[in-house]
Image: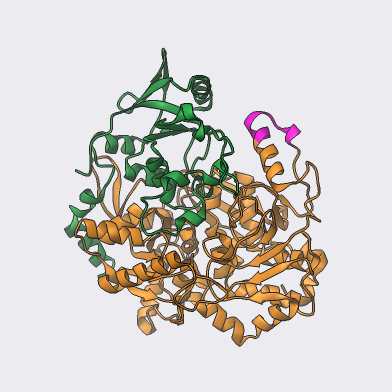
Amino acid sequence: MSGVAIRKINGRGVYVEGNDIDTDRIIPARYLTCVTFDELGPALFYDVRFDEHGRSKGHVLDSPERAGAEILISDNNFGCGSSREHAPQAIMRFGFKAVIAGSFAEIFHGNCTTLGIPCVVMDDDHRSELSKLVTNDPALDMMIDIEQLQIICGNQVFPITMKESVREAFLDATYDPLDTLLASGDKVNAVAEKLGYL
Amino acid sequence: MGLNLYQKVWNDHLVRQLDTGQYQVFMALHLIHEVTSPQAFGMLKDKSLKVAFPDRTFATVDHIIPTDKQERPLADDMAEKMIQVLSSATKENGIEFFAPKSGAQGIVHVVGPELGLTQPGMTICCGDSHTSTHGAFGCIALGIGTSQVRDVLASQTLVMDPLKVRRINIQGTLALGVTAKDVTLHIIRTLGVNGGVGFAYEYGGSVIDQMSMEERMTVCNMSIEGGARCGYVNPDQTTFDYLKGRERVPAGTDFLAAVERWRSYASDSDADYDDVVDISAEDIKPTVTWGVTPGQAVSIEGCVPDPNDKDGLEKTLINDALTYMKLSANQPIKGIKIDVAFIGSCTNGRLSDFQSVAAVISGKKVAPNVRAIAVPGSEKVDREARELGLHEVFEEAGFEWRLPGCSMCLAMNPDKLVGDEVCASSSNRNFIGRQGSPKGRTILMSPIMVAAAAIEGFVADAREVFDLEGAGV
């Protein structure tokens, strides 16, 4: 087993508006000169949050009442662009445990899954409603239920979707697939031999 | 019903279905580089694992290498460290490393094809989204994250869900001055930056059939900007002619046998597709971006859009893009002043890109307000360009001819925009801050359009600036 099963995620949300938020924006390239991911948390959305002198621009992520929020909400095609795993690493190390969006770019989605960060898909109407609730009340708690595919927030229940195979992987704790992949060495060698790669 | 290439390559490389319903798929070729791979070696070490198929793994350095001087140690300590970590990891694990000054270093997506490592029917992966480039040879070529790099190093396999396949037919004949870059920008503009989510793109039709391998690489390269997981072209005689005689390609009767195998991967004539899109070559004009995503593009004859034509979030996004780019609604795209011109990258840093520009800039001068750089995609491209004297043509026109690397595409090396400079760029992304300054502005276009902008000092129509017919471009 690669980790613990992820069934439910509780926490407060923060809404970062915008379609097509790319991984360069999530983590600017200059933070990629590193040989470990350890220091990436504070660099999340850096150029959106700070000016060239490092002064806060008053971004929602830096609002004191949002400190410790665990669920990041955004719009469509979140995480497009570069394949850099530094992006979900920064999101995770900043403290987020899940991302809700209208849709996700696929490499980003794959990277998040391996790290145990569920990418939760929510349609425009429901997401807009949830974003409003969260924006109006920073203290509002929500619960993402991966088993039931719903979000409970206040007295409301919102439907969500996930790729079924990925949902399975969260529920049976195989989202980090390395051990699973290593368990079939003989079959891998057989394919390699058949194709002349050995 | 026949099969398409994606299905054939998938079936051949499939190891097994997992309990979750996902699949384990063998990777025929794994390319690694200094930015996304060193951490993966660390993860392997933590688990006391070895590289499973070092002979199927190749490394080079491209993102962080400076293009003005590459003497070691590099001025940037962390960049130097990244190269050293990669170098020692490859040595430790028996992986071939195309180091700087080896004669084979370059942008990973230029190096793989030119050495002949990239071959039809392969599954290829690399910790870089533009791995889709290799699809030009009829491969499933995937950009992956670092944890997946770890998975491939340790097992030579990836966990995957099958993609849908969209056939994109581009029929007709491209007009003079319309290049592969314009084709890809046009596709992205038409289908949207997330239009390809869930799909592999199969490019075909007479326009693709007539393209060289380098042009096909430009098209496949930007599949990712259209949201597709990968893109490919079916292998044909153009593919085989390109591969013949390359260093890592079988020779003699082995080559003939390989061609037969490669040919068999091409989509069957009665193959099934999840979607088909038809695009007419006549509709494609020289295309440039005006905004902050590659889909925010317009014909060089057109104008910047008006946010008031849209509602809601879409309106906000256009407004935000115009504010960032410091452009006005309805402004003609032609005439926007530029500060920097960049020709290079994995999209347009191959020999033919520099040949086409050299053919038109000879005898012309870069505008005095423009800093212009030409960056070959690899040491081999640099060598061949120099043999043809292209570097002199560029230098005489006022370009700097640089050493190979990713350069100004992505701001991980000293080549960066300053302040709110505007760059006419042959690269692939115009995201906010992409070229190194949080206020820098990128306008994507083809290499000859970059050259036209460099000469005029503003975004210009290459068809008006150059005698393209006379130059044979």
Q: Nearer the viewer, residue B457 or B139?
A: B457
Residue B147 point in image, percent of width and height? 33, 52
Whether residue A72 appears in this view of the structure is: yes
Q: Quadrant of residue B421?
A: bottom right
In-image side of A176 versus B174 (left or right):
left
Q: Nearer the viewer, residue B300 or A29?
A: A29
Q: Nearer the viewer, residue A97 or B155?
A: A97
Q: Which residue occupies 23% across, 52% down?
A: A181
Chief SS of the magenta region: helix
Q: Is residue B276 above or below residue B41?
A: above
Q: Which residue occupies 36% across, 25% down?
A: A149
Q: Chain A's shade in the image?
A: green
Q: Is residue B300 above or below residue B76?
A: above
Q: Quadrant of the C terminus of chain B?
A: bottom right
- Magenta region: which residues? B307-316
Q: Quadrant of residue B88?
A: bottom left
Q: Quadrant of residue A190?
A: bottom left
Q: Chain B's shade in the image?
A: orange
Whether residue A122 appears in this view of the structure is: no
Q: How is the image coloured?
A: by chain
Q: Tell whether position A26 is magenta.
A: no
Q: Which residue occupies 58% across, 57% down?
A: B436
Q: Nearer the viewer, residue B187 or B357?
A: B357
In-image side of B76 versus A6 (left or right):
right
Residue B285 point in image, percent of width and height? 73, 56
Count of number-bearing discs: 0
Q: Tell whether position B308 is magenta.
A: yes
Q: Residue furthest top?
A: A155
Residue A140 point in image, percent of width and height? 43, 20
